Image: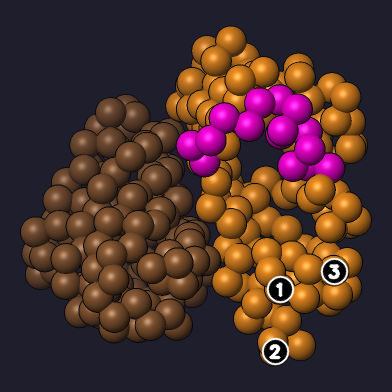
Chain colours: A brown, B orange
Amino acid sequence: MHPDELRNLYDAYIDCLNSRNLDQLGAFVDQDVDYNGTRISLAGYQDMLKRDFEAIPDLHFNITLLCSEPPMIAARLNFDCTPSGILFGVAVNGKRVKFSENVFYEFKSRRIRRVWSVIDEATIARQVKEA
Amino acid sequence: MHPDELRNLYDAYIDCLNSRNLDQLGAFVDQDVDYNGTRISLAGYQDMLKRDFEAIPDLHFNITLLCSEPPMIAARLNFDCTPSGILFGVAVNGKRVKFSENVFYEFKSRRIRRVWSVIDEATIARQVKEA
């Protein structure tokens, strides 16, 4: 696969998330997906995203960097949102916070098979304290 | 530049860090390097690494994932170490901790010009609490 093809596929995955179209997630995510070393499966991946959308009603995934080398792609995602309650153990309670996620994906047969994510949780606590 | 060439250059940069050869850092890092959106310059980059090596005497950079698409490369680095005192605000005090960093680099003329890093700080606090 050409790097641009994987980039387009990843863009379509992010569009699926941003349109809250979780019924279509199986078009992009493998049944046996692993997340940070744990097999969570497609259903677990959908549940994780549902919880994210409940915790952050205005959640939007903004791609700011992409590094595509099939079958791997790495993305830097930026978030600018107002989590309604507790997020990552921090009582955000509707305050506006900005944070980043740097995340790697390994694709298999055009679907995400493994994910390794690091979210900048510490910056959220700092922003809520400062607010 | 071919993806493998950038991969080899990045390997050499990591070898430079792991050999504590900070006098040679200028061979890999641009004078005007930005780190997470702030111009810290080569001298500031060296100072940051010196502080890291003081805080974590057994610090070793282990590359576990690489995604190379020149002029960008993304790496997942794993750390397994015993920070001597406080790290990221957590009193680790010699306990053994494991954590990851997902980091993007943009190269310019074979040197690192911009870095976007996210370190899994939250996992360190959890490991110290559980120990």
Q: Residue at x 85, y 69 (%)?
A: B85
| Residue located 21% across and 36% down the image | A8
Q: Can residue A9 be seen at all in this image of the molecule? A: yes
Magenta stretch containing residue A18, yes or no?
Answer: no
Q: Quadrant of residue B24?
A: top right
Residue shown at 63% from the left, 32% from the top: B40
Read off the magenta span. Answer: B36-50
Specify whether A109 is left or right of B81. left
Q: CA distance from mark 3 to mark 2?
A: 17 Å
Q: Quadrant of residue B26?
A: top right
Marks 1 and 3, how far apart at CA: 8 Å
Identified at 66% across, 26% down, the residue is B41
Measuring from the top left, give residue B51's x and y in whole percent: 81, 48
Amino acid on which disc 3 is placed:
Gly
Dominant secondary structure, magenta:
helix
Work out whether disc 2 and disc 1 sit on a shared chain. Answer: yes
Quadrant location of the C terminus of chain A?
bottom left
Q: Which residue is more in the foreground, A100 or A130? A: A130
Is disc 1 in contact with disc 3, using a CB cutoff of under 8 Å?
no
**Pointer 1: what residue?**
B90
